Image (cartoon, grey):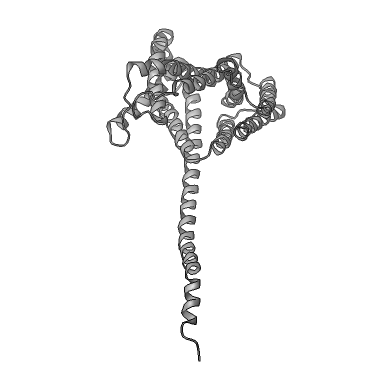
Amino acid sequence: MRAVGVRPRAQLARTPVAVARVSMAEAAPAEGSSGLLNTLKVGFLFGVWYAFNIVYNISNKKILNALPFPWTMAVVQLGVGLLYLLPLWMSPLRKAPKLSSENIKALMPIALMHGIGHLCTVISLGAGAVSFTHIVKAAEPFFSTVMSAIFTKSYFPVPVYLALLPVVGGVGIASLTELSFSWVAFLNAMGSNTAFSLRAIFSKKAMEKPQGENMGAANLYGVLTIMSFLMLLPFALVLEGAKLKGGWAAAIAAGHTANYLLKTSLVSGLFYYLYNEVAFLCLDNVHPITHAVGNTIKRVVIILASVVVFGTKMTPLNQIGSSLAIFGVLLYSLAKQYCK
């Protein structure tokens, strides 16, 4: 005969474990599903980021080949951002930023460096091969460390500086072996590196205190884009305004249609803004190390895409130099994160 109460005690003793097992069993599919969705989301964002980058770089090079007016194209690309931003700020999707005159004054140095950096990049892309510009721009971390030491007295651990050696060496090899080497392309890519490094330093200093309302990363970028547009516009009009009519006529005579010229200009501007917008979304969804690795892969993707589309020839030494520079950027990004 079974003792009454023995079985219930055993059941009661096991109840917490059983409940825990049931809870874990129920939670596991939910957690797995959530993790899978997040992975798919991040993968999608990175894919869109790369795709938008490719479209921008290819359309930018095509329009510069047809209309060699880099000041004008840089201003158009910044200005197209207005067509994206203003409707967005007037809708419920994103709150419009609110800035005082003090805020605008604080952001002006950042906007100036943003505009100069973009202008130099456009000039470089127009003067040389897209792949060459991006190889030289891979040296931006070197400029960042130098500018940080000069302006903020910030220094990094030794492994970070050692990681810059392959970057500098790779860019040097790639430049010396570039078949379509152009000093204009090289110097402007270097100018872009300098400007963007200063932009980062000025941004860090300015953002130590809040700059206006509704100024998240995406809105900050939008405000800087508008300010840069207004800064560069007068110079573009003075330097290239009188030449545009003749250049447009020459492009039409060369076989380009007005529709092609307008469409390609707008596409380059739209995708310039969109790829930067998606870059912020990527940064918000992943660890900085993942973002740094993704940014390195992005440069590889752009170089490969431009080589395929434009038929750019690269010598074996040029390929080695490019690979070394990009590998160095990856090492630098990882070293900087791990040595924090």
Q: Quadrant of residue 99?
A: top left
Report x, y in % for residue 187: 59, 15
Report x, y in % for residue 101: 33, 16
Q: Please count the marks in the image.
A: 0
Q: Residue at x 59, y 15 (%)?
A: 150
Report x, y in % for residue 114: 46, 20
Q: Is residue 132 left or right of residue 99?
A: right
Q: Is residue 76 left or right of residue 7?
A: left
Q: Quadrant of residue 264?
A: top left
Q: Residue at x 38, y 15 (%)?
A: 105
Report x, y in % for residue 154: 59, 21
Asked whether the viewer can see residue 62, the reply is: yes
Asked whether the viewer can see residue 132, the reply is: no
Q: Quadrant of residue 215?
A: top left
Near-viewer residue (48 or 261): 48
- Quadrant location of the C terminus? top right
Near-viewer residue (128 or 15): 15
Q: Residue at x 48, y 64 (%)?
A: 20
Near-viewer residue (234 or 209): 209
Which residue is the extreme one toward the bottom? 1
Near-viewer residue (301 or 95): 95
